[in-house]
Amino acid sequence: MSLRGIVRTVSELCITVGAVIVLFVVYALYWTGVQADRDMTEQVQRLESRWRKPQPVAPKAKTYEEGQPFSVMHIPRLGFTWNKPVLQGTDTGTLKKGLGHYTNTAPLGGTGNFAVAGHRRTYGDPFKDFPELRRGDAVVVSDGTTWFTYRIDKGPYKTVPTDIEVIDPVPRKSGYTAPGRYLTLTTCDPEWGHSHRLVVWAHLDSTSPVDEGRPPALRR
């Protein structure tokens, strides 16, 4: 093969590789977001439809089915239209559909640490603006019968993925020193990487029945 032929072949390969990279970026930035937004909307609609049905008078123990949604989270700091479903579990498939509740952490509103993970980027970018969270910000979660309003006390705190103590019942680096009703949110850092984690910790500030309307934190 002549030098000209070699150059042409290499050029064609570079163009092909470049096209593949562009297609992958489009998939990562756009298509996964479209799919995830649709999935999250479906999860919220499924929950709201379930909540509209008559509920048993006697409350059931809080048990969550793996991979299924059980609550909706609102964070006004991220926008008053920001709401995401919370599903049980944190495996890859579950986090494509919304936020994931860490198995073996406390139930919503329960004593201990209700810990939730979410993607920073791709799959709808649910926690894209996570670094904007500040102390005092509200995180409001509904299970269809009760509004649970948590208030952030610390974060975003940067750590490594192996630091699993951040979701302990009383997280050591959170500043909490006694058992309580806590919330932990985690996401990846940097924005397009996963070498570290960002964490915020919050305490349960108040609860109110859904029948009484939205809590103050969600009123404009």
Image (spheres, rainbow, N blue to C red):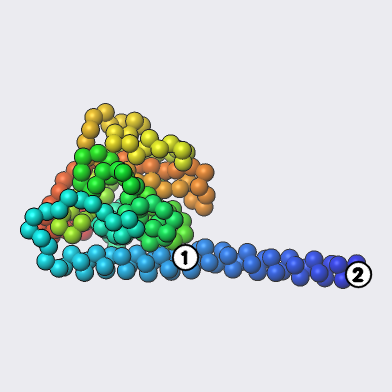
Which image quadrant for residue 104?
top left
Of marks 1 and 2, which one's residue comes earlier in the chain? 2
Residue at 36%, 32% in the rendered image: 173
One can see residue 150 in this view: yes
Residue at 78%, 68% in the rendered image: 11
One can see residue 78 in this view: no
Residue at 26%, 58% in the rendered image: 70
Relative height, residue 120 to residue 173 (above, below): below
Kind of element beneath mark 2 = loop
In the image, farthest residue toward the left: 57
Residue 32 has which mark?
1
Dot 1, crowdedness within 10 Å: few (<14), some or many (≥20)? some
Q: Which residue is mark 2?
A: 1
Figure quadrant of the N terminus: bottom right
Dot 2, crowdedness within 10 Å: few (<14), some or many (≥20)? few
Q: Residue 27: x, y in percent?
A: 53, 66
Q: Residue 88: x, y in percent?
A: 32, 54
Relative height, residue 141 to residue 40 (above, below): above
Q: Amino acid at mark 2?
A: Met
Kind of element beneath mark 1 = helix
